Image (cartoon, rainbow, N blue to C red):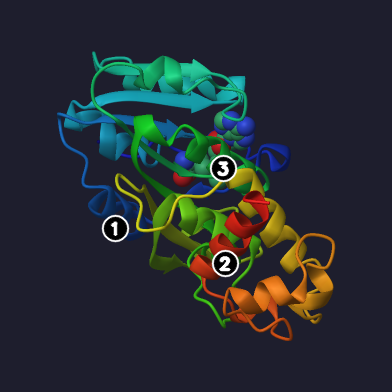
Amino acid sequence: MSRKPATHRPRKRFGQNFLTDHSVIDRIADAIAASEQDHVVEIGPGQGALTETLAPLKCQLDVIELDRDLVPGLLAAFSIYPHFTLHNADALKFDFNTLGSAGAPLRVVGNLPYNISTPLIFKLLQDAPIIRDMHFMLQLEVVQRLAASPGSKHWGRLGIMAQYLCAVEHLFDVPPEAFNPPPKVQSAIVRLTPWQSSPWPECDQAQLRQVVQASFAQRRKTLRNNLKALIDSADLERLGIDPGARAETLELTQFIDIANAIHAK
Ligand code: SAM
C-alpha cells in the first residue's frame, strides 16, 4: 500500500514523531514477523506507518490511538480489513485483558510516545500472562537501560525490574532523520518477551522493587548505607554480598537474595 501524504500536523503533547523512513519501517516489520495466526495490538498507530505493514497480513489487529483527529484517517485506510479494530483510547488506561482473555496471546507493538513508555511497559508486564512479546521503538537511552548488564553505567532499577519479568533484546538503533519531525534523541527498537518459565528464583515483586529502589537511591553510596533501613551488613555478608560494594556491581540474583532474606524475616 502506498503511504498517505502527511496531512496531520504532528502534535508535541501526544509525542507525535511519525516514522517516514521505509527501510526502518520494513526492518521493524521483519523483526516483528507477524503472521495470520497472531493477535497484534499496535499502540499509537499515528498515520499508520507500521499499521500498513501489519493490516494486510490478516492477523487480528487492534490499534489504540489517543488523538481523535487521527481516527478518520486510520479508519479510511484500514477499516477495509475485517480483522482491524480501532480503539480511540489512552493506552495507559486501556484494559488489555479485554483483548487477550481468549485466543492467541497478544503481540504488542508500537513506536511509543517517549513520555509514556516506561509506565506503559510496566503496566503491560503486569499483564504478562496474556502477552507473547512486545516490540517497541523507544528512546535509545531507555533501551540501553532496559537491556543493561551488571557493572555497566546503565544498570539500574529499570533494567533489573524489566529483566526480572522478561527477556530484553536491543535489536537496532534508529536515527532522528527517520521521523517527521525528527526527535532530539536517538531511538532504538527493543524486543521484550515475558518469561514463560522464569530463569530467576521466585521472589516477592514488591519486595524486590523496594530493595532495588533503595540500593540505587544514591548510586555512589555503598549497599551498607543505602540498605541500612532494610537489612544489616552481617546479613548481607551471610548472603555472600560485600556491604561495601555499590549496587551497580550486583547481579539480579543477588538483589533477589536480598529481597528474599528481608521477606523471610
Ligand atoms: N506509529 C506512528 C509512526 O510510527 O509513525 C506514530 C508514532 S508517534 C511517536 C506516537 C503515537 O502515539 C501518536 O500517534 C500519538 O497520538 C499516540 N499516542 C500518544 N499518547 C498515547 C496514549 N496515551 N495512548 C495511545 N496512543 C497515544
Q: Position of residue 3 (x, y in %)?
A: 35, 39
Q: Are marks 3 and 2 in contact (CB under 8 Å)?
A: no
Give the SS element for disc 2: helix
For disc 1, the neighbor class at 10 Å (few under 14, some 14 to 19, many from 20) is few
Label 1: which secondary element: helix
Q: Which residue is mark 1?
A: 27
Is disc 2 surrounded by few (<14), some (14 to 19) or many (20+) residues within 10 Å?
some
Q: From what the image shows, is residue 36 above or below residue 198?
A: above
Give how far across and how far down residue 8 sits, in percent. 57, 33
**Comes first in the chain, label 3 or label 1:** 1
**Residue closer to the observer: 55 or 156:** 156
Amino acid bearing label 3: Phe
Residue 192 image point, x, y percent: 40, 51
Residue at x 63%, y 40% (from the top left corner): 10
Contact between marks 3 and 1 (CB within 8 A): the answer is no
Tell me the quadrant of ligand 1. top right
The residue labelled by disc 2 is 145
Give the numbered dot on residue 122.
Answer: 3
